[in-house]
Amino acid sequence: MKLQELGEFKLTKLISEIIDKSRCPECDSWQRLSIGPGDDAAAWQSNNYIQLATTDTMVQDVHFDLDTVTWEELGWKALAVSLSDIAAMGGIPQYALVSLSLPVELEVEYISRLIESMTCLASKFETAIAGGNLTSAPNVVITTTLIGYSRGEILKRSTACAGDHIAVTGYLGASAAGLRNLLGKTTMNAKSQEILRRAHLHPIPRIKEGQALIQQGIRTAIDISDGLIADLNHICESSKLNAWIELEQVPVHPLVKLNFPDYQELALCGGEDYELLFTADKNAIDRARQVLSCPVTVIGEITEKSQPEHVALRDKKGNITPHEKEGWNHFGNGLSRAKLT
Amino acid sequence: MKLQELGEFKLTKLISEIIDKSRCPECDSWQRLSIGPGDDAAAWQSNNYIQLATTDTMVQDVHFDLDTVTWEELGWKALAVSLSDIAAMGGIPQYALVSLSLPVELEVEYISRLIESMTCLASKFETAIAGGNLTSAPNVVITTTLIGYSRGEILKRSTACAGDHIAVTGYLGASAAGLRNLLGKTTMNAKSQEILRRAHLHPIPRIKEGQALIQQGIRTAIDISDGLIADLNHICESSKLNAWIELEQVPVHPLVKLNFPDYQELALCGGEDYELLFTADKNAIDRARQVLSCPVTVIGEITEKSQPEHVALRDKKGNITPHEKEGWNHFGNGLSRAKLT
């Protein structure tokens, strides 16, 4: 069987199972490991805190096109996606390692701009770029590793409870809309285009917000990288529960709603918004709303597991709407099909 | 200017300078960072120990050819090179993150074999594979990140002293000879071929040996990845000193000496032996020799900086021999030219 037939999520599961079989119960490293493969970051108990580590890779012509992005944008985004994973754990980022695979015919100037942009974002979150790796390659591949910590609790995917409300920071769909603008013609005005472009290429990881969620007693979160439905699916899968989303409540970015007829699709499945999707009881979410400076919208509820499909969509009248598409599947054909009740 | 004109080492320097300019003296992460870009691993002070982190990338058709290596060998080597960086710091490895960029048409079975081989090596050194990343890509790229620690001291590149003896563990040249066998025809017998193949594709990182060096009071080491001369050059550069190597003393692997007329070249510049190259006073090296179960050979001496070229070669009579080649330069044309006095 080929990877494209198995798909990303089953491959992830297969790899996790192989790693799990190798678990050594007597080893200190395994004993301390509280979260292995399958969350936004790995987590293990250090002396006085929980250590976090995550890694992400961006590949030329898979995640970006050098004809449409600047080197500054590329550097920013490559680091932002890993910082966002630390944000989704409620962690404090500390150190980044940057591995660059680069064609030898690239201009040195480009790499300076890429690294300068990374240092700019790293500084914003008091993160030191501590090392990395350089190698030649036929196409550009950037892997960023982020190491951080949390003093006490962390945000996990596996801790949702039936009855939890589901909430999301910020607005959704702008990143996917920005990507669509990059790929094709658009009649939007330049300022709107620029806003959507920045949403796609210059995301601001929700570091402070993740830490604030923990302070308000929230324990379940993920960042929206694959797409709202796909990422809620990850929470449901890890927590062994179901969920529904009320379509009308999903906070679609105003520019997306205004300019794209399929705005709902972009907000539900577009991905790469790097907003935080979290679940908690109503009171905790109300408290979070008060302390966060970004919008917090309740969009649905976690339910007992009664269906094999995790996430259902509800319209205003409470009717369940089937949904045809899932989020990004690296080893499928882009957006793969997932049935919903 | 293009990357291939600048070369790997100047690009590394340029990137380090950009990162260094972004240093934030008030930030906790920067304050704790004792080793940033430019050693085998990054190091920072944690509460009771020194934390270590390193990352390495292997790219299809740059570092390996899928026609000549097995998936087990690929998995083993990808993890071994990062473990070797922790060994070169005298550290204890704890956690690995594995990022795989894979063509969608690959067989799932291959990836199972790759991961199983990684877990096998990880278990050997009580390291937990704690997470990673999966993405599709036109060619295979594997990035491994290793996180480890040291309880007290670490081995650095920058701590060599004039008068230090230079020593190396094990034998050199076997990995480069193994690579040459993979690339071309050979008349060697199957058993010898297999030994050299394993030296190239199945290196055993010198984890215990690195820790033992620290216990014997040694503070300066690097692992031989670029090649003996290139890596000694890194020590000299970091320590702002010169060095000479006595050619006859270099411990060439017996099979390399027997089968390759240019055995000296393979041992000096071949690289990827993943042996430890270290410097210390004679007594410390004698103590190390007694406690290590592998061969330890003194091959030269660190000297005051009197020449712009760092490493000189001496023959039996004490004559200085010019040397034409340096080690692997990722952004040059393979082996690049470096003048020596």
Image (cartoon, coloured by chain):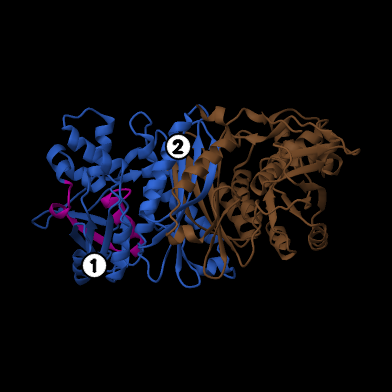
Chain colours: A brown, B blue
Quarter of the rendering containing residue A290: bottom right
Q: Is residue B283 left or right of residue A256?
A: left
**Numbered label tally:** 2
- Element at label 2: helix
- Element at label 1: loop
Q: Is residue B249 left or right of residue A116?
A: left
Magenta-drawn segment: B225-253
Instruction: Please tell me which residue lies in front, A208 or A127.
Output: A208
Q: Position of residue A102 (x, y in %)?
A: 48, 40
Amino acid type of the residue tagged 2 in the rendering: Ser
**Gap in Å between the C-alphas at discs 2 and 1?**
46 Å
Instruction: Please tell me which residue lies in front, A124 or B129.
Output: B129
Residue tagged 2: B112
Q: Residue at x 54, y 37 (%)?
A: A11
Where B229 sits versus B48, above or below?
Answer: above
Q: Is residue B227 located in the magenta-colored stretch of the structure? A: yes
Instruction: Please tell me which residue lies in front, A300 or B51.
Output: A300
Observer able to see residue B306: no
- What's the chain of the residue with tag 1? B
Residue tagged 1: B164
